[in-house]
Every structure is written in C-alpha cells, then in structure tokens.
Amino acid sequence: MRPQEGLFHAPGAFSAIAVLRLSRNEALPQLRETVRALYTELSAAGGLHTVLGLQPSLLPGAPAASALLPREGPTARFPSTQSHVLVQVSANGRELLLWALRRVLALSQAVLYLEEEVLGGRIGEGRDAFGFRDGLLRPTREQVRRAALVPSGPLAGASWLLYLRFLQDLERFGRLKPQARERVVGRTPDGELVPDAPAEAHLHRARASGAGENQLLIRRGFPFRHTGEEGLAFVSASADPQYYERSLDALLGVGGQTPDALLRYARAVSGGLYLAPPTNWFDASSSQRETPP
Ligand code: HEM
C-alpha cells in the first residue's frame, strides 16, 4: 500500500490548510469521486506537496477512534472543529500554492464547502511566531515510515493526521525576559537546549509522552498570520491516534502531569483528527484535470 508522498516532505516556503465540510448529507456518495479527483490532480503537480485526510469514519476499516478532541487539562483546552476533509498543500512558490487552493475549491464545488483556510509559510530559516527555531530534527524517510504510517491491516500505509490551529500571544510572550522565554520553550531561540529548563518547558512536556526526536509523530506545521493574529497551524502525522492522546495529555497536564508552560501563551482555536488513506484509495482516472502553472 503506497502512502501519500506528501507525508514525507516538510512544508516548503509556503503552506496552506483547507478544511472542507460536506455541503449536505446527500453529497456523501459523491465525496469519494471528488476527493479522488482532487488528490489525483494535486499530487500530479510537480513541486507541490499534498496531504489529504478524511474524517476517520468515512474510511471503511477505520477503527472507531475514541474522541481525541475536545480535550481539556487543568489550565487549557484543545477544541474540536472536526470536519470531513483536510487538505494540506506546500510549495516553494506562492503561485503554485494559490493554484492548488483554487483547484481545491473548483473541484469540490457542490459537494464540499470551504470551512477554514489558513495560509502561511516559513519565517526566516524556520522559526515560529515567537522567533524560536522550529522543526530542528528533520525526520528521515525511514523515521516517517516508522512513526507516521499504519504498518499493517486494512489501513496499511494510511496515516493519522492531527490538526490544531494555535493563536500565539506575541505581546504577552514578548513581555517576558529573554531567559524566561527560553525556559518556556526549553530551547534558546537558535535551538540550543536549555540545560536547567523546568519540567513545564514545552520541550520536556513534548518529550514526556515519548514523542521527542520524531518517535511517535512527525510534525508538519507552519506559522501563519491572518487579520492581525499570528500562530501555528500544527499538523502532525502518526501511525496510531493513541499516541496523540498521550502527547496531548502530556501538554495539557492531564492526570496530575505538569501542564506545558507554552500553553499560557498559545491557545488552540480549532482542530480535528483526520486519516490520510494510502494512494490506492484514490485510484481511478479523473476526467477534469487541469495543468498547473
Ligand atoms: C503553538 C503551539 C506550538 C509551538 C509554538 C511549538 C513550538 C515548538 C518549538 C519552538 C520546538 C523546539 C524546536 C524543535 O525541537 O523542533 C518544539 C518542539 C516540539 N514540539 Fe512543539 N510547539 C507547539 C505545539 C506542539 C504540539 C501541540 C505538540 C504535540 C502534539 C508539539 C510537539 C512537539 C515535539 C514532539 C517537539 C520536539 C521535541 C524533541 O524532539 O526534542 N508541539 N515545538
């Protein structure tokens, strides 16, 4: 079973998320043909990386996943705005990215409508909106295979996608002294480990679940700015949704754990769990292809 190639690529200079909802329940039978056409066209465009996920219950053979979202800890909450289809597109040029987003809309007309769209991209050499280097440990193809792909069974080659859109409070974080900021993240802005970072530092909380060093999940998020607000469109791929439960609980401080200090400065405003089927799920030629620029 061939996984979606986009899973192996970090977002390029430009990246976007489109979340789409079925326009009406009667559109369900057309959904498969629509996402098939979408995936076939976008994945054929050179230089564009595409990952397409569906609400898990839409895929035959998907286990009835226990509700991952919403999820709550003593000090923060990750909401659910679960929808039907999530498309992440990434490119090194903005023209190609915009073409892809236009095609998503054109091909999904009458079956899906656009519920949420986030456009963003790399800041500098790869920093988050707080100015900290992010995505430091680049996963190899083998690490992606191990951490992000369902290894066997009816879903072999599929990948569980977690999407969480965070708004970051730049003003509040900016009021902290530089040393205090580093202790919130657990790294310096340039990515050096902070040796005496407290247990609540983001790095320690992320590692507490075993998700550090590309072990349980592969991060594919990107920073964005929209109508005066900045944040992170957090996207990740994993072989097992239970790893997300562990990771999110470790950040939220569920079950007596220490909540993540970063969540005092970043608030999740939307999110959902999707399943990216292997490419054979999309097989069948599409009639209305367009050539990219
Ligand atoms: C606004 C939200 C977030 C921001 C600004 C953020 C930022 C960062 C930064 C700056 C790093 C250090 C650089 C690096 O190791 O690549 C990092 C590491 C990491 N984050 Fe986040 N993060 C956010 C949310 C999340 C969430 C929701 C998860 C998990 C579900 C997560 C999991 C991780 C992991 C696994 C690491 C790497 C730990 C390691 O391998 O050492 N992060 N994050």
Image: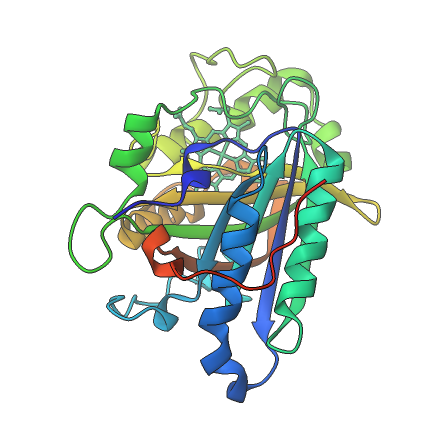
Q: Is residue 83 visible?
A: no
Between 163 and 190, the one lying in front of the other is: 163
Q: Residue at x 68, y 23 (%)?
A: 131
How far from the left and from the top, in percent, is residue 54? Answer: 44, 63
Q: Residue 222 appears in which quarter of the rendering? A: top right
Which is more toward the observer, 236 or 52?
A: 52
Residue under the point 53% across and 14% down: 191
Q: Looking at the image, which is closer to me, 31 or 231?
A: 31
Q: Residue at x 65, y 53 (%)?
A: 290
Task: Identify which residue, 24 or 69, lies in the foreground.
Answer: 24
Outermost residue toward the right? 228
| Residue 216 picture quarter | top left
Q: Residue furthest bottom?
A: 26
Instruction: Give the image location of residue 202, x and y in percent.
Output: 47, 32
Q: Position of residue 13 (x, y in %)?
A: 66, 28
Q: Is residue 148 left or right of residue 260?
A: left
126 horizontally vs 94: left or right: left
Q: How many marks?
A: 0
> Is residue 102 in sight in this rendering?
yes
Quadrant position of the C terminus in the picture: top right
* x and y percentages locating residue 66 in the rendered image: 30, 67
Q: How is the image coloured?
A: rainbow
Residue at 69 percent of width and 52 percent of height: 101
In the rendered image, the vertical position of residue 24 relative to residue 216, given as above or below: below
Q: Which quarter of the figure has residue 109?
A: bottom right
